Image: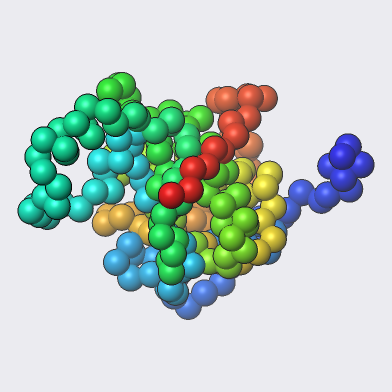
Amino acid sequence: MEKVKKIAARPKLRLVKSRHSPGFAVGAVDVVAAPENKPLFTPDAVAYEEDTFLVLSAPLEVREPQKPLSRLATEVREMEPEIPGTVLAKGKSPVRLLAVVHDLNQEPSWQEEWITSALEGIFREVERRKLSSLALPFLGTRHGSLEKERFLWLLRSVLERIVPRSLKRVCLMLPPGTDPKMLGELNASRRGKKESDPQNTRKARGHLRVR
């Protein structure tokens, strides 16, 4: 195993030139950005920012309950929270990957370690299913206060460690008001000063549950 680690080359970061959107690449994976309602391609999997009780990605519209209220109340009382940092895979075409990066009972509700762990879980599940494309939100930025630039740094670091083989394209879903040019800053930061990892040598590992 040690020999494999020494032989494997660290993927290089390169800019992706596109008429549609700026981006960058890590190894064989091209990362581009587009408005969240206008993806550049139809992905094989879509990731969602989620909390331990799976509230954040739940439908907003009010529907008539399909079960008796007494049964629903019992299910709510017996519900066990998901573990922060885990990923739940649901459905197919596209696969829905629920990234649990928030615990709404805590303040703040997110931690970088959870986001890193969830990113690792997402990419491992994509590789397990041999999927080639992924739509990914800026985890921890919409329902948390993580800086978008910091999320990009975490994303790049995870891609460099895992080195996906089947995954070829990642479309970052830009929330309203996000400047797409921020992706170019990754290349500048790569050539300039190195950003330190607050987790230091401790590396989170992604956990996965499939439903």
* Residue at image coords 58%, 67%: 132
Q: Position of residue 16 (x, y in %)?
A: 58, 67
Q: Position of residue 28 (x, y in %)?
A: 68, 64
Question: Is 10 or 84 nearer to us in this picture?
Answer: 84
Q: Residue furthest right?
A: 3
| Residue 174 appears in the figure | yes
Question: Is 80 or 110 nearer to us in this picture?
Answer: 80
Q: Position of residue 72 (x, y in %)?
A: 16, 38
Q: Position of residue 10 (x, y in %)?
A: 76, 49
Image quadrant holding the N terminus, namely top right
Query: Dividing the picture into quarters, in which one does residue 103 lie?
Result: top left
Q: Height in image: 116 above or below 134? A: above
Question: Is 184 or 207 nearer to us in this picture?
Answer: 207
Question: Is 164 or 55 nearer to us in this picture?
Answer: 55
* Residue at image coords 9%, 40%: 69
| Residue 152 appears in the figure | no
Left or right: where 210 falls relative to 199: left
Q: Height in image: 161 above or below 107? A: below
Query: Dividing the picture into quarters, in which one does residue 173 lie?
Result: bottom left
* Residue at image coords 51%, 30%: 113
Left or right: where 160 falls relative to 24: right
Number of labelled discs?
A: 0
Q: Residue furthest top?
A: 106
Query: Dividing the picture into quarters, in which one does residue 197 lie?
Result: top right
Left or right: where 131 falls relative to 42: right
Q: Give the colour scheme of this rendering.
A: rainbow
Q: Height in image: 204 above or below 121? A: above
* Residue at image coords 44%, 74%: 41
